Image (cartoon, grey):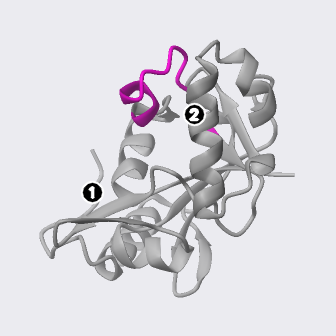
Amino acid sequence: MIYYHYTHLAAAFKILNDQKIIVSRAEKKMGAKNPACWFSINSEFEIGQFATYRENGETHTIKTVEEMALTMGSVRFGFNKLNGFISFAKYKHASKDPIELYNTLQNEANKIGADTKEWYACFTPVDLNYCIAAEVYLESKWVEIVKNKDEQFLFSTINKAMKVGRFFTDEDSFKAK
């Protein structure tokens, strides 16, 4: 089973540059004592609570991988289960956060159609050295971007995905450090 961290292109750039997935900034803003990195065993796409964008003054929740790919790009990093991964049910107690925060996360997940039985949390950053797959959603399929590919392939694939996403301009591009 693969545990995926789903994200958008801008966050993926940071993950690739830092070589790690950090804990959720959104959870920090919600007041979580122990924010986590989030993963899903859903192999198609995970409807995320924080996968939103603003357009024309309105906030829109992204509910499909296609919608995410066409707005801000869709990237996922896959891992085998690591020691620090815990289920959402265990997160309730391990996070030491008020039960109200857990209930809010659960209720919001239900509203958007997410299945928290597929969710796993990790309270520490996750190093990309443990990553077994890195993929971008492009042309209606997940395309591998890192493993066994050269750096030029990585840049050209991500830049192609950026051209599809409507929130990127012609000046945006991913380049080597």
Q: Residue furthest right?
A: 1
> On the image, numbered disc 1 is attached to which residue?
175
Front-lying residue, 117 or 3: 117
**Mark 1: few, some, or many residues within 10 Å (few <14, many ≥20)?**
few
- Residue 63 in sight here: yes
Question: Residue 148: percent from the left, percent from the top?
Answer: 64, 59
The amino acid marked with disc number 2 is: Cys
Instruction: Indicate the position of residue 109 as horizontal and vertical percent values.
Output: 62, 52
Q: Which residue is mark 2?
A: 37
State how far apart marks 2 and 1 are (Cα).
Answer: 26 Å
Q: Residue at x 38, y 48 (%)?
A: 11
Q: Is residue 79 magenta?
A: no
The answer to which quarter of the image holds residue 60 is bottom left
Compared with 138, 43 (above or below) is: above
Mark 2–mark 1 CB contact (< 8 Å): no
Residue at position x 29%, y 59% from top? Answer: 174
Asked whether residue 128 appears in the rendered view, the answer is: no
Residue furthest bottom in the image: 139
Please determine whether, in this image, residue 108 is positioned above or below residue 70: above
In-front residue for pair 130/61: 61
Specify the farthest residue to the left: 171
Question: What is the quadrant of residue 115 in the picture?
Answer: bottom right
Which numbered tag is attached to residue 8? none
Q: Position of residue 104 (x, y in %)?
A: 56, 38
Find numbered disc 2 in the image and state the secondary structure of the residue it sits on. strand
Answer with left or right where residue 53 lies relative to residue 94: left
The amino acid on which the numbered mark 1 sits, given as a three-letter code, is Lys
Residue drawn at the location 38% of the way across and 64% of the way down: 155
The region drawn magenta spans 26-38
Residue 96, compared with residue 81, is above or below; it is: above
Q: Is residue 30 magenta?
A: yes
